[in-house]
Image (tube, rainbow, N blue to C red):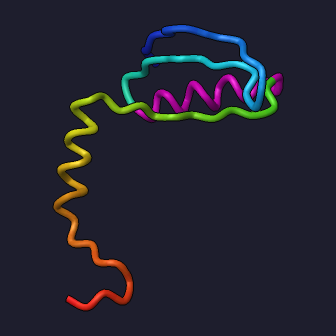
């Protein structure tokens, strides 16, 4: 599957632990999440995709170019 484990931390609060992995793609990250959940020892998992600065800038440019108008707004 590939990837790299960057760290694991225990916590207290809503989430009891955090794992930071780097995966080659979103499908590999999802497979990792499903795989560790399948054992049944975890109550729940949550995956958050992180964006690099470059990806964020690209996303903001794309969002700016969307022809969005709020509902009810007349052109």
Compare residues 21 and 63 and report the one nearer the observer: 63
In the displayed structure, does residue 9 sit left or right of residue 71?
A: right
Please tell me which residue is depicted at 73% across the width and 27% down the height of the picture: 15
Q: Main secondary structure of the magenta part?
A: helix
Q: Is residue 27 magenta?
A: yes
Q: Residue 19: image x %, image y %?
A: 59, 17
Q: Quadrant of residue 64?
A: bottom left
Q: Quadrant of residue 71?
A: bottom left
Q: Residue 33: image x %, image y %?
A: 61, 29
Q: Is residue 75 magenta?
A: no
In the displayed structure, does residue 17 sit left or right of residue 53?
A: right
Please tell me which residue is depicted at 21% across the width and 39% down the height of the picture: 57
Q: How many marks?
A: 0
What's drawn in magenta, residue-wise? 26-41
In the displayed structure, does residue 71 sit left or right of residue 60?
A: right
Work out whether 34 lies above or below 69: above
Please tell me which residue is depicted at 27% across the width and 72% down the height of the picture: 68
Work out whether 58 lies above or below 45: below
Please tell me which residue is depicted at 63% across the width and 19% down the height of the picture: 18
Q: Residue 44: image x %, image y %?
A: 75, 34
Which residue occupies the extreme front position in the image?
73
Work out whether 45 lies above or below 74: above
Work out whether 31 lies above or below 72: above
For the C terminus, the quadrant is: bottom left
Compare residues 61 and 20 and report the one nearer the observer: 61
Q: Residue 5: image x %, image y %?
A: 51, 9
Q: Quadrant of residue 24?
A: top left
Compare residues 37 and 51 and report the one nearer the observer: 51
């Amino acid at each position: 599957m590939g990837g790299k484990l960057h760290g694991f931390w225990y916590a207290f609060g809503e989430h009891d632990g955090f794992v930071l992995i780097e995966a080659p793609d979103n499908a590999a990250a999802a497979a990792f999440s499903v795989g560790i959940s399948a054992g049944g020892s975890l109550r729940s998992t949550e995956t958050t995709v992180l964006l690099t600065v470059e990806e964020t800038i690209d996303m903001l440019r794309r969002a700016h170019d969307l022809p969005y108008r709020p509902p009810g707004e007349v052109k």
